[in-house]
Amino acid sequence: MSDYRIGTKCVQGGYTPGNGEPRQIPIVQSTTFKYSTSEDMGKLFDLEAEGYFYTRLQNPTNDYVAAKIAEMEGGTAAMLTSSGQAANFFAMFNICQAGDHMVASSSIYGGTYNLIAVTMAKMGISVTFVSPDATEEELNAAFQPNTKLMFGETIANPALTVLDIELFAKVAHAHGVPLIVDNTFPTPVNCRPIEWGADIVTHSTTKYMDGHGAAVGGAIVDGGKFDWMAYADKYPGLCTPDDSYHGVVYAERFGKEGAFITKCTTQLMRDLGSIQSPQNAFYLNLGLESLHVRMPRHVENGQAVAEFLENHPKVAYVNYSGLKSSKYYERAQKYLPNGGCGVVSFGLKGGREAASIFMRELKLGAIETHVADARTCCLNPATSTHRQMTDEQLIEAGVPAELIRISLGLEDKEDLIADISRALDAIK
Ligand SMILES: *Cc1c(COP(=O)(O)O)cnc(C)c1O
């Protein structure tokens, strides 16, 4: 599959049925798997043979879909998780532990920010947040001897900043640590971070990959290039025997290509059990089959609405990296030449009150705490998710009172613009 283009991988990657086997990926709705002898099963436990024994760790449906995502991202191995939160947590916790430190972009999804700043802090893992626009010098200054990874989002949710992946990867590698990139918003259709030097890629598959608002899920992909053994003292979990798994040394047994995902499956999935259900993996695959057809339409609608808003007298500003006026336009041209995604944010001159009227008047754009599916939806953080904050606190959090985030779906852009135009007219 590796020679095929992205669209072909979306449709046919990961699963090649044999003679007389199901054409569609089968849903293996079974918690467990049968063996003839204990010796057969023992080989699985010793990681000497490949196979399935319990769906908390691995399931064939998930593995077909994960293999497709690995091919799409240009990685060597992948796994599915129950959510995007689980994907980011597992990707980080697989290589750091109490006493370790990470460097993360400050412009990331709120849930991931809390995961790192609150929950992982309680586990003894510390963080230095950096601006996604930091210089090489500033990034270097954030590193400590105990830093184990660097993290950022290709296009941040909801700030829509664009990450300089090449620069982040260069700095991470200069310090002998991998770069983990959450590639949820552009998806591998619009950006493949591994090609720009990222080592691990994560996804909330809940968003465009599923694309229909049907199933919560996540994915982790390993680029297979980071040389763990070259930094064996930093990554004892990968480079020294795992006593909880019959003394296996993951980096030796599975090499650069397989060590990360194998450890993440056999240790973290085993102990923390956050696997995606095979049924959800099946839905996810249905979404993946049309991802390359849907993403250009999301981008087309995002671009059209962003341009319309930018020229509207009631709109104060628009954030969308496809606009020439965007601070991220140049960077987006480099990393996202076919466009980024269908999420746009903008501010109304009339502030909080205008935002509330606009949202009430919209007919096609439903009010939801969701983004990136087939139906257009929008959110005014100040009157919903962030309503406990004062106007000053909202500005500090990067979500001023007038800010509206709108996720353009797959509808006809003429209808979307007419709906938005009418709602803007209702503001007096
Ligand atoms: C939604 C989201 C997450 C969290 O994903 P869930 O599937 O909701 O757990 C992580 N990162 C980004 C960029 C997101 O948009």
Image (cartoon, rainbow, N blue to C red):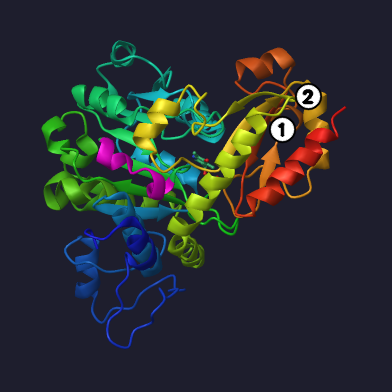
Q: Is residue 40 or residue 185 the one in the foreground?
A: 185
Disc 1 + disc 2, Cβ < 8 Å: yes
Residue in the image at 26% along x and 82% along y? 36
Distance from label 1 to label 2 (Cα)? 8 Å
Question: Is 270 on the left-hand or right-hand side of 293?
Answer: left
In the image, residue 375 above or below residue 236: below
Q: Which x, y percent locates residue 328?
A: 45, 25
> In the shown orientation, is residue 413 left or right of residue 209?
right
Quick check: can you spot residue 59?
no
Which residues are the magenta region? 187-196
Q: Residue at x 59, y 59 (%)?
A: 214
Q: Magenta segment: does it hold 194? A: yes
Q: Amino acid at mark 1?
A: Asn
Please state, as top left, top right, bottom left or bottom right, where the N terminus lies in the image. bottom left
**Quadrant the C terminus occupies:** top right
- Density class for disc 1 (Cα within 10 Å; few <14, some 14-19, many ≥20) is many
Query: Would you identify the image quadrant in which residue 61 lies?
Result: bottom left
The reply, left or right, for residue 91 in relation to residue 328 is left
Q: Which residue position holds label 2?
A: 352
Disc 2: residue Cβ within 8 A of ligand 1's nearest atom: no
Q: On the image, numbered disc 1 is attached to which residue? A: 380
Disc 2 marks which amino acid? Arg
Does 74 appear in magenta?
no
Tell me the element at label 1.
Answer: loop
